[in-house]
Image (tube, rainbow, N blue to C red):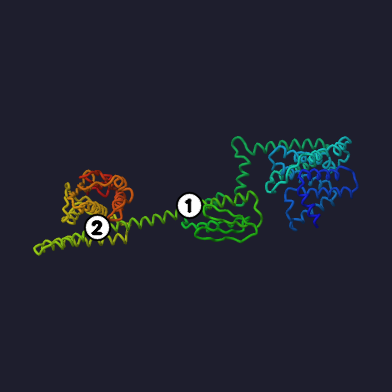
Amino acid sequence: MPWLSTLAVRLTRVAPGRWLALMLLALHAAVAFDAEAAISRGFLLAHYGLFLLWQPLVRSEARIEPRLALPVFAMAALLVLVDSPWVLALWLAVLAGLVGAVAASHDGRRQHLPYLLALAYLLALLLAWVLPQSLGDTALPDELQFAVRYGLPLLPLAILFLPGERQRGASSTLDFIYGLMLSLLVIVMALGVFAVVAVAKVGYAWALVQTLLGMAALLLALSWLWNPRAGFTGLGQLTSRYLLSVGLPFEGWARRLATLAERERDPESFVRDALADLHELTWISGGRWQAARGEGHFGDQAPHRVEHAFHGLALAWYAPRPLTPSLALHVRLLSQLLGYFYAAKVREQTLREQAYSQAIHDTGARLTHDVKNILQSVKTLLAAVDTATPEDSDRLLALMKRQVPQLVARLSQTVDKLKQPTEMDAAHVPAQAWWAALRARYEHDDVGFSADALDETPLPQDLFDSVADNLLANALRKRRGGVGVAVEVRLSLRPTVALTVTDTGAPAPEHVARNLFLSPVASDFGLGVGLYQAARQAARSGFRLDLPANQAGQVTLRIQATDSRHPDISAP
């Protein structure tokens, strides 16, 4: 009906303080006045209806499911049909807890005032009227009866005429823990008074004083234990640790997660195994995860779902019932921790892939330069054959016998490097033998060779072959301009092993010289990574490649041992 819908809309616009005041007035009329049973039950029923309009647990416009409506009607029947002071005392304790929870969820003093007045009214009605009747002490003083009947209603009337506040938007902001503790405190106080009266056989007033003093002492002790000054960590910290690890030993799971991260290298497999380890959580029935390279699920689906996404890992948790704030915080913490570990595994995998690609690049670049140097030597031999005369046949044959076996050996070494790149720098050769082979390879290139007294000092063959070929190829390339460029190679073993190549050609530009051994440079003849790769190879073997002189008429490049005691260059 239209008028019923209009009435419902208008009722939802009434400030909650108005419903609270009317609810308390109806309760006062049902409890404090000696009316007939039918009239008292009618006021109690009206009080409960006003309570449903005020209650902060469910939105006023929300539809109540049948399974939730059953407890509502059961509580109404218990309150209206059962004529017992103890039922009324329990209801007042519940109301006091709800009012206290709403008061704790507000910030301003103006918002606190209506609920503080309501809490004072409920406690006064319980202590001055309901509780004495539940103990069988019905002979209350006339002054007290008058004050309760006609003085206490002033508190609900004050609430009724206070400025109204808008209805709260959501029920999840209530401090349920505070309300529960307040309700339990009121119940303990009532039971304490009953126990003192029954055991000590004293009057109600003196029993109430003893109970309040005992509770005050207990609360004082608990407040000190909650956050002590020294020694004990405090109940507050213990409670916080329990709430953060509720249902799961968090430290143990984190330790297992770290162990799994060390053992499992694949990010997706790590996430799958880590989530499979959460089967002990009774409040989580299952979940789903999704990442860049895979997805999966664990457990079973449930009606309630919570989603989180951290560092490229999306997680959906299924729960059989709505998660409390502490459990929701716990799920978020677990998701965030798992996301951090997943991001670390992804970075680790990316670094492995980059290192693998870099190793392939380094090996390919070095082998490319070796093949290029071998090809240069072959071209030199072919040039010697083209320019040879019939009278030079004996000399050419001797040259071929010396150079071709060396080229075959170097080509075989290059193929072996491709098969076993980790053993590229393992072979050593005596300094005398290596020097003789180098001079034989470049004897037709008009290169000057000079060396100090040579002995059997072992040199890393692959390193010195590669570096020497790179340095001599760069120096000899300067002769293509038609200008006579002198090239000189010098080998010294004392005090440290050093190979120096000097030419009289043009110097390298400043920007090229600055980055010559630090990064690849632009080149018109190759890949521009020859000296860069040679410098990295030298560094791995305990040598340093540098440019001690870079000026017109004197360009010097040198490879030198960084430590004279290096095992690779020590004399036998």
Amino acid at circle 2: Asn
Find numbered disc 1 in the image and state the secondary structure of the residue it sits on. Answer: helix
Circle number at residue 373: 2
Residue 515: x, y in percent? 32, 47
Residue 283: x, y in percent? 63, 55
Callout in the foreground (1, 2): 2
**Viewer-nearest residue: 65 or 225:** 65
Q: Is residue 210 above or below residue 72?
A: above
| The N terminus - image quarter | bottom right
**Viewer-nearest residue: 480 or 235:** 480
Residue neighbourhood size for the residue with mark 2, other residues' Cα within 10 Å, grouped as few (<14), some (14–19), many (≥20): many
Residue 128: x, y in percent? 83, 39
Q: Is residue 173 above or below residue 270?
A: above
- Any part of residue 497 in sight: no
Circle number at residue 344: 1
**Viewer-nearest residue: 219 or 554:** 554
- Any part of residue 35 in sight: yes
Amino acid at circle 1: Ala
